[in-house]
C-alpha cells in the first residue's frame, strides 16, 4: 500500500495512530441508505409537485441537448422517472430519493477512505441522512439532487488519488466531472477550488502529473457536446447567470452565506464538520481538499450565488469530522451526546424539509418562510381548476391559448389540462415555444395586463389566483386576465413576455 495511505496522525500527547483506508461497513451503511429511500418515497405524495418539478416535466416532453437555463440531464431523468414510476409527484421524485441514498453511501465511503472505523462510517451515514440539505434535495427533484452526488464522487476520487498516491483516480474524477456538466455547471467551482488549493497547499507535483492532466482532458472530452451546445446557442448559460445576478438577491445571498453553512447540515452537527475541516487541514495529504471548501465558498460569495452552491463539500467535512470523533474517548456520556445530536438534527431536519405537517397547519408556522420548496409545492391543482372555470366561461367558439408568467404556473396548467388549451410562457426555455398565429384570444395567469394590452383589442382582469392554504406560493393572488381581439402578431408581442430568472 502507498505510503500516504499509512500516514501517521497525532491524536493526543505522545500518542499516534496509523489510519489506512478502512473496510466499508456495507450492511450498516446499506441499511441507512435504504431507510432514507423508504422515508422519502413515503413522504413524496404529501403536498404536491414543486414548481421546478412541473417545469422539468414539461421540458422532458421536448428532449434536447440543452436548454437556455440548464443542461439536459435533470429534465431527461424527470421524463424517465415519470415513464417508469408514473406521472405523479411520487414517480418524478424517485431519482431524488436515490440520490439521497447515494449521498449517504458516498459520505460513509469517504469516512472509510480517511481511515474511519465502522462506527465512524455509521455516524457519518446517519448524519448525512438526517441533514437538512440531503433531505431537501432527496424529497424534491432538483438539479442539486444530482449535483450533490457528483461532487461527492469527485471528492472521493480526489481523496483516493491523494491519500493512496494512485494517479488513476484522477481519471475517474475527470469522468465524473464530465458527466456532471450535463446536469449543472457548478462542479467547475469544485474543480477550480481544488486546483487552486493544490497550488496553495500542495502537493504541487500533482498539478503537473500526467494523471491529473489526463483527468482534465477526459472531463473536457465528455463535456464537449454540452459545451458545444452553449457555443452554438450564443452561451445562454452566461445570460442566465447574468439574469440571476440582476435579480436583486445577491446581497441577501452574501448576508446569509456563512450562517447558512451551519443550517445546511444542521446546527447540532456543525461542531463535527467544523472539526473535520480542521482535521483535514492538519493532515498533509488532505489539505487541498479542505482548502477547496473555503475557496469554492469565496467564489460563490463573490458571484452572489446561493448559500447552498458549495453544500456538497460540507459532507466531505462531516465525514472527516466523524473519523476524528471516533478517536475521541467514547465514554457512555459522550456516546449519548453524539446520539442526541444525531436524533435532534434529524428531527429538526424532517420537520423543516419534509411535508410532515398538514397544509392547514404549515401555513401558520414559520416553515414556509424558511423553505421555498414548501411554499411552492402547495395549491397547483387549485390554480388549474380556477383557470378551467375562466376558460369555460368564454363565449362559445372561442379558441384561446393559455399564457403563464413563469414555469411553475405553466407547469401546473400542463399537468392538469382536463380540456384546457395549450399553455405557453415567456419564462426561460418555455419562451422558445410561441403560440400559433391562429389564436386570437388568451387567458393569462400572473402576467401584468399592461404587457398584453397593446397587442389586443381588449384585456380585462377577471379574477386572482386563490390557492386555499396560503403558504406563500408565488402564484397566490396573481391576476387572471382575459385578452381578446389580438392585433399584434405573436412574433411582435412575444418579446414583451420573455424573461430569464
Image: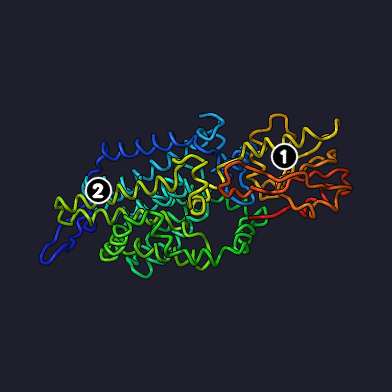
* Near-viewer residue (456 or 431): 456
User: In the rendered view, does 35 fall on the left or right side of 325?
Assistant: right
Q: Which mark is residue 114?
A: none
In whole angstroms, how far apart are the C-alphas of marks 1 and 2?
51 Å
Where does residue 326 sit, x and y in percent of width and height?
20, 53
Where does residue 224 sit, x and y in percent of width and height?
55, 51
* Near-viewer residue (346 or 265): 346
Mark 1 or mark 2, whichever is nearer to me: 2
Q: Seen from this angle, which residue lies furthest bottom?
A: 200
Report the number of numbered marks: 2
Residue at 25%, 63% (x, y): give it. 283
Where does residue 173 sit, x and y in percent of width and height?
40, 51
Crowding at dot 2, Cα within 10 Å, few <14 / some 14-19 / many 20+, comes out as: some
Residue marked by disc 1: 423
Residue at 42%, 54% (x, y): give it. 215
Question: Residue 301, can we see it?
Answer: yes
User: In the rendered view, does 43 fall on the left or right side of 127?
Assistant: right
Question: Residue 109, can we see it?
Answer: no
Residue marked by disc 2: 339
Amino acid at each position: 500500500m502507498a505510503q500516504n495511505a499509512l500516514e501517521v496522525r497525532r491524536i493526543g500527547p505522545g500518542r499516534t495512530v496509523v489510519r489506512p483506508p478502512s473496510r466499508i461497513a456495507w450492511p450498516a451503511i446499506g441499511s441507512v441508505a435504504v431507510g432514507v429511500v423508504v422515508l422519502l418515497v413515503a413522504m413524496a405524495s404529501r403536498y404536491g409537485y414543486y414548481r421546478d418539478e412541473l417545469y422539468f416535466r414539461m421540458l422532458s416532453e421536448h428532449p434536447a441537448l440543452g436548454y437556455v437555463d440548464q443542461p439536459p440531464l435533470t429534465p431527461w431523468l424527470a421524463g424517465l422517472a415519470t415513464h417508469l414510476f408514473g406521472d405523479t409527484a411520487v414517480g418524478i421524485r424517485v431519482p431524488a430519493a436515490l440520490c439521497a441514498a447515494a449521498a449517504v453511501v458516498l459520505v460513509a465511503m469517504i469516512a472509510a477512505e480517511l481511515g474511519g472505523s465502522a462506527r465512524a462510517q455509521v455516524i457519518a451515514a446517519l448524519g448525512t441522512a438526517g441533514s437538512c440539505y440531503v433531505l431537501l434535495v432527496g424529497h424534491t427533484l432538483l438539479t442539486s439532487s444530482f449535483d450533490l452526488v457528483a461532487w461527492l464522487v469527485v471528492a472521493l476520487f480526489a481523496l483516493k488519488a491523494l491519500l493512496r498516491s494512485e494517479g488513476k483516480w484522477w481519471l475517474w474524477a475527470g469522468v465524473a466531472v464530465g458527466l456532471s456538466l450535463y446536469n449543472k455547471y457548478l462542479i467547475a467551482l469544485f474543480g477550480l477550488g481544488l486546483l487552486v488549493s493544490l497550488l496553495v497547499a500542495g502537493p504541487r507535483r500533482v498539478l503537473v502529473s500526467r494523471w491529473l492532466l489526463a483527468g482534465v482532458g477526459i472531463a473536457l472530452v465528455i463535456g464537449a457536446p454540452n459545451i458545444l451546445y452553449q457555443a452554438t446557442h450564443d452561451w445562454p448559460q452566461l445570460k442566465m447567470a447574468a439574469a440571476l445576478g440582476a435579480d436583486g438577491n445577491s446581497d441577501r445571498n452574501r448576508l446569509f452565506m456563512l450562517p447558512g453553512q451551519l443550517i445546511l447540515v444542521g446546527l447540532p452537527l456543525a461542531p463535527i464538520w467544523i472539526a473535520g475541516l480542521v482535521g483535514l487541514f492538519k493532515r498533509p495529504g488532505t489539505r487541498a481538499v479542505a482548502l477547496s471548501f473555503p475557496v469554492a465558498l469565496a467564489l460563490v460569495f463573490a458571484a452572489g450565488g446561493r448559500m447552498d452552491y458549495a453544500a456538497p463539500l460540507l459532507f466531505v467535512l462531516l465525514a472527516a469530522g466523524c473519523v476524528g470523533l471516533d478517536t475521541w474517548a467514547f465514554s457512555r456520556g459522550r456516546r449519548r451526546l453524539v446520539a442526541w445530536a444525531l436524533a435532534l438534527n434529524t428531527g429538526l431536519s424532517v420537520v423543516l424539509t419534509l411535508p410532515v405537517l398538514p397544509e392547514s397547519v404549515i401555513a401558520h408556522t414559520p416553515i414556509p418562510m424558511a423553505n421555498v420548496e414548501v411554499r411552492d409545492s402547495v395549491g397547483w391543482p387549485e390554480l388549474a381548476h380556477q383557470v378551467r372555470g375562466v376558460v369555460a366561461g368564454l363565449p362559445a367558439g372561442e379558441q384561446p391559448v393559455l399564457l403563464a408568467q413563469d414555469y411553475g404556473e405553466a407547469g401546473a396548467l400542463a399537468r392538469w389540462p382536463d380540456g384546457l388549451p395549450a399553455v405557453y410562457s415567456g419564462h426561460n426555455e418555455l419562451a422558445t415555444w410561441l403560440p400559433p398565429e391562429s389564436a386570437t384570444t388568451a387567458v393569462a395567469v400572473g402576467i401584468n395586463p399592461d404587457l398584453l394590452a397593446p397587442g389586443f383589442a381588449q384585456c380585462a382582469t377577471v379574477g386572482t389566483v386563490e390557492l386555499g392554504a396560503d403558504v406563500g406560493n408565488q402564484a397566490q393572488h396573481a391576476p387572471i386576465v382575459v385578452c381578446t381581439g389580438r392585433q399584434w402578431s405573436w412574433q411582435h408581442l412575444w418579446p414583451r413576455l420573455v424573461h430569464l430568472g
